[in-house]
C-alpha cells in the first residue's frame, strides 16, 4: 500500500485536508522516520507481564541496551500468578516462581513501574491499563500479548507483539510497521436484553471467520457501538485478535472521555483541557475512507456460544450444532472439531451438559461483567456437580465487587471467589478444570487444549456462563431470567 | 541471526487451517524463562499419546519416518493465530524448522518468525494444497527447495513456483540483519521527535 499516495490525496481538490480515519490521525502523529518500506512509529506505552517480561528485559540487558523512556513502560504480574487467597511468588504452575521473581528483578533494574503480586492495583494488563488511565485516546500502546487490542477501545492504536518486537520497542521507543489496511465494522440497531458485546464479537467471527480480519486495523462503529459503555467496548475490541486483526479501535466520544477523566494516570487541570481538545478531533471524520466496510444488524442478535474449537465456531445458544454446510468450515475441520468437542451435528446446544463454569479474563472480567453474572446468580445455586470460578480481572474490580456484595452472591451460588489474574483462561500446567471436562467460559479462546489437555471450552458472555452454571447445561440466559 | 539464502530440506504437510500458537506450543510446555529447550513442547498436544507424556503418537506427521528431520512445514490458512507467544517460533526453530509455507499467517506470528530468521512463504491456497498432497502421497522423498534470492520454490517434480515476498523482509532474512541495530542507527531524529511531541501532547509523558 502506498502511504504517501494516501496521505497526500485531497478531498474534492479544494485544498481541504482530506477526511481521515482515527487510525490515520494516530499514525500521522507517530511517524518518527519513514522509508520505502515500513515506518518507525513512536510507541507511547509499553506493557510487560511476567510470562515474557523477563526474557525481553534480560535480552536487552545482555546486549548492553537500555530501556528508552522507562517512565512509559509498565509491568504487570497477571499471567501465571496464582489466584488463590494468600498467594505469594510460589505458583501452582511448575517453575512459575522464576517467571515472577526474574521479571520483578528485571523491572526494578530497568526502572520500570511494576504492579506486583500484592499491589493494590495488580490485575490483568488490559483491565488495569484503562482502569489506571494509562490507556488514553490517541496513544500507541503495545504489549507482548495478543489481547492488547482491547485497549484500542479508548480510541488508541493498541496491538500485540512478540518478545523480539517488545525488545525493539523497549530499546528504541518505536516499532517498525506498515500502516495496516482498515476495516470498519458497523453494528447497527438495538441490542436485546441479556445480549451484549461478547455476543456481537462472536457474531462477527461466525460471519467472517477467524481469519476474516487478518492483518487489518478494525474500527467498530454504528449505533449499537455508540450505545455501549466503555467496559463493553473493551470486550468488543478484545476479541479482534481472534479475528486475526492487528488492532481494533473505537472513535473516542463522550463515553470515552467520561471514562478516562479522573483516573490515576489521566491528565489533570490545564493539561486535561488540552488533551480533551486534542481528543475531540481524533474520531474518524464523517467522510473518512476505509479499505473495507461491513455492517451487522443486532436487532435480532441472540446470546451466542461456541460449539467448536475456533472462536469462529459460534452460533446462537438457541440453535443447534451446525451441519458441515452451515459451519463455515471444511468438512475435515468440522469433523475434527466435533470429535474433540464430543458433539453431533443437529444437536440442540441447550441439551449439552457442563462440568465447569469460568467467569473472568481480559475479555469479561470487569465489574460490569461480574454484575451481569451476579444478577443471574442472585438467589440461585449452581447445579450439582458443576465447579464454578469467578476470577476478577483486577484487584480493584475485586474490591469494588466486594463493596457491592457481589462476592457473597457468587459464593452463595456455589462459585469460588478468587484473587485477580488471567487464571484458567489458559492452562499453564498448574491448576486445571479436569481432563476432558466441558467448560462454559467467559474467556476468548476455545482452542483444543487451551484450558487444559482435552478440556472442551464453550465461549460465551458472563451472563450466559452464569445461567449455564445454574442449569448445569448450556443455557439461554433469557429463559432463566424469565423463569 | 542466521541468514537465509537457499534451503533444500524435507517438508512436512500439516494442512489444517487456523493452527494456533497454543497448539504449536501449549502454555504448560513453557517451563522456564528461556528461549531454549522448547523443542520437546512443539505440538505437544498432538505429538504425544497422552497429555504431559512423551510417548510419540505415531499418527502425527512429525513422528513419521518419512518426515524425520523436516525443516519446512507446509500448513493451512492463518497459521499461528491466537497467542502472541514467540515461544511458538522458538520451538519450531529448535526443532529445526527454517521455513513455513502457508496460504496466510497470523500477523504477530509472522513478525515473530521473521525476527528469528524463519521464512514465512505465502502461496495461493490451491498451490499449498497441491504441495501438501504431493508431500503426503508422492513416491519420492518429500523434499523442497526454497531459493530466497531468486524467490523460487522448487517442488519434488522439479517444477519451479515463483513467490512474492516483502522486499524488506527478504533483505533482512538474506543478510540475517538485526532489526534493533538497524533501527538504532536510523533513529537519530528520535530525541527531536520527543521534544516536539512533549510540547504537543504533554499527557503522554508521565
Image (tube, coloured by chain):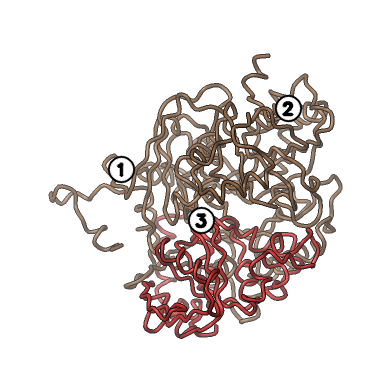
Give percent across and percent down for residue A6.
26, 58
Is residue A68 among what the camera can see?
A: no
Colour that chain B carries in the picture: red
How crowded pointer 1 is (Cα within 10 Å; few <14, some 14-19, many 20+) is rated as: some
* Same chain, labels 2 and 1: yes
Give percent across and percent down for residue A49.
67, 59
Q: Considering the numbered disc 3 on the image, is that residue within a helix, a strand or a loop?
A: strand
Which residue is painted at 71% across and 63% down in the image? B44
Q: Considering the numbered disc 1 on the image, is that residue within a helix, a strand or a loop?
A: loop
Q: Considering the numbered disc 2 on the image, is that residue within a helix, a strand or a loop?
A: helix
Q: Which mark is residue A404?
A: 2
Give percent across and percent down for residue B160.
37, 78
Colour that chain A carries in the picture: brown
Q: Give the quadrant of residue B71.
A: bottom right
Task: Answer with left or right where residue A17 lies relative to residue A228.
Answer: left
How crowded pointer 3 is (Cα within 10 Å; few <14, some 14-19, many 20+) is rated as: many
Quarter of the image for the C terminus of chain B: give it. Answer: bottom right
Task: Answer with left or right where residue A367 lies relative to residue A453.
Answer: left
How crowded pointer 2 is (Cα within 10 Å; few <14, some 14-19, many 20+) is rated as: few
- Residue under label 3, please give it: A159
Q: Which mark is residue A285?
A: 1
Q: Nearer the viewer, residue A103 or B87?
A: B87
- The residue most toward the top is A483
Quarter of the image for the N terminus of chain B: give it. Answer: bottom right
Q: Nearer the viewer, residue B118 or A255?
A: B118
Q: Give the quadrant of residue A104.
A: bottom right
Task: Answer with left or right where residue B115 lies relative to residue A432.
Answer: left
Of the two numbered discs 2 and 1 on the same chain, state the one appearing first in sequence: 1
When the figure is inspected, residue B5 is found, relative to residue A230, above or below; the finding is below
Label 2 with label 1: CB-CB less than 8 Å: no
Amino acid at each position: 500500500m502506498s502511504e504517501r499516495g494516501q496521505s497526500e490525496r485531497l478531498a474534492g481538490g479544494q485544498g481541504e485536508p482530506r477526511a481521515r480515519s482515527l487510525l490515520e490521525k494516530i499514525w500521522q502523529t507517530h511517524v518518527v522516520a519513514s522509508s520505502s518500506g515500513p515506518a518507525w512509529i513512536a510507541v507511547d506505552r509499553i506493557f510487560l507481564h511476567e510470562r515474557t517480561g523477563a526474557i525481553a528485559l534480560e535480552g536487552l540487558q545482555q546486549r548492553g541496551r537500555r530501556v528508552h523512556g522507562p517512565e512509559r513502560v509498565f509491568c504487570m504480574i497477571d499471567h501465571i500468578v496464582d489466584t488463590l487467597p494468600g498467594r505469594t511468588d510460589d505458583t501452582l504452575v511448575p517453575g512459575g516462581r522464576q517467571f515472577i521473581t526474574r521479571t520483578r528483578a528485571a523491572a526494578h533494574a530497568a526502572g520500570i513501574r511494576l504492579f506486583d503480586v500484592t499491589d493494590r492495583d495488580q490485575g490483568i494488563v488490559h483491565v488495569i491499563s484503562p482502569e489506571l488511565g494509562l490507556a488514553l485516546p490517541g496513544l500507541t500502546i503495545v504489549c507482548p500479548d495478543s489481547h492488547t487490542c482491547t485497549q484500542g477501545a479508548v480510541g488508541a492504536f493498541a496491538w500485540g507483539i512478540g518478545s523480539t518486537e517488545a525488545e525493539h520497542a523497549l530499546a528504541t521507543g518505536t516499532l517498525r510497521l506498515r500502516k495496516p489496511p482498515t476495516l470498519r465494522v458497523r453494528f447497527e440497531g438495538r441490542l436485546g436484553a441479556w445480549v451484549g458485546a461478547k455476543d456481537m464479537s462472536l457474531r462477527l467471527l461466525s460471519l467472517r471467520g477467524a481469519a476474516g480480519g487478518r492483518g487489518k486495523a478494525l474500527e467498530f462503529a454504528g449505533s449499537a457501538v455508540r450505545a455501549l459503555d466503555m467496559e463493553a467496548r473493551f470486550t468488543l475490541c478484545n476479541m479482534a485478535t481472534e479475528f486475526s486483526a492487528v488492532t481494533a479501535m473505537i472513535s473516542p466520544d463522550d463515553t470515552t472521555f467520561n471514562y478516562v477523566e479522573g483516573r490515576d494516570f489521566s491528565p489533570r487541570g490545564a493539561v486535561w483541557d488540552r488533551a480533551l481538545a486534542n481528543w475531540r478531533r481524533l474520531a474518524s471524520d464523517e467522510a473518512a475512507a476505509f479499505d473495507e466496510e461491513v455492517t451487522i444488524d443486532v436487532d435480532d442478535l441472540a446470546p451466542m456460544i461456541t460449539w467448536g474449537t475456533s472462536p469462529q465456531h459460534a452460533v446462537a445458544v438457541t440453535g443447534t450444532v451446525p451441519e458441515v454446510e452451515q459451519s463455515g468450515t471444511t468438512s475435515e475441520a468440522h469433523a475434527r472439531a466435533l470429535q474433540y468437542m464430543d458433539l453431533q451435528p443437529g444437536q440442540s446446544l441447550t441439551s449439552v451438559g457442563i462440568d465447569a463454569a469460568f467467569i473472568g479474563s481480559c475479555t469479561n472480567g470487569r465489574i460490569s461483567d461480574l454484575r451481569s453474572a451476579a444478577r443471574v446468580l442472585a438467589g440461585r445455586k449452581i447445579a450439582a456437580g458443576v465447579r464454578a470460578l469467578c476470577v476478577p480481572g483486577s484487584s480493584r474490580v475485586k474490591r469494588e465487587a466486594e463493596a457491592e456484595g457481589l462476592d457473597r452472591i457468587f459464593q452463595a451460588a456455589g462459585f469460588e471467589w478468587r484473587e485477580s489474574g488471567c487464571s484458567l483462561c489458559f492452562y499453564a500446567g498448574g491448576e486445571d478444570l479436569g481432563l476432558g471436562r466441558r467448560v462454559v467460559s467467559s474467556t476468548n479462546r476455545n482452542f483444543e487444549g487451551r484450558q487444559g489437555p482435552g478440556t472442551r471450552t464453550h465461549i460465551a458472555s458472563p451472563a450466559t456462563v452464569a445461567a449455564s452454571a445454574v442449569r448445569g447445561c448450556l443455557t439461554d440466559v433469557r429463559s432463566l431470567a424469565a423463569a | 541471526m542466521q541468514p537465509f539464502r537457499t534451503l533444500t530440506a524435507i517438508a512436512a504437510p500439516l494442512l489444517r487451517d487456523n493452527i494456533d500458537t497454543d497448539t504449536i506450543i501449549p502454555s504448560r510446555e513453557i517451563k522456564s524463562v528461556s528461549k531454549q529447550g522448547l523443542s520437546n513442547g512443539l505440538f505437544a498436544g498432538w505429538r504425544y499419546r497422552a497429555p504431559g507424556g512423551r510417548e510419540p503418537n505415531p499418527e502425527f506427521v512429525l513422528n513419521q519416518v518419512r518426515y524425520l528431520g523436516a525443516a519446512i512445514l507446509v500448513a493451512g490458512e492463518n497459521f499461528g493465530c491466537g497467542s502472541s507467544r514467540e515461544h511458538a517460533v522458538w520451538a519450531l526453530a529448535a526443532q529445526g524448522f527454517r521455513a513455513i509455507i502457508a496460504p496466510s499467517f497470523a500477523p504477530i506470528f509472522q513478525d515473530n518468525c521473521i525476527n528469528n530468521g524463519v521464512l514465512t512463504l505465502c502461496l495461493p491456497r490451491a498451490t499449498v494444497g497441491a504441495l501438501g498432497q504431493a508431500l503426503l502421497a508422492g513416491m519420492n522423498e518429500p523434499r523442497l527447495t526454497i531459493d530466497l534470492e531468486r524467490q523460487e520454490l522448487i517442488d519434488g517434480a522439479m517444477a519451479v513456483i515463483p513467490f512474492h515476498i516483502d522486499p524488506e523482509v527478504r533483505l533482512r532474512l538474506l543478510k540475517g540483519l538485526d532489526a534493533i541495530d538497524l533501527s538504532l542507527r536510523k533513529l537519530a531524529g528520535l530525541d527531536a521527535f520527543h521534544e516536539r511531541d512533549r510540547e504537543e501532547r504533554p499527557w503522554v509523558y508521565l
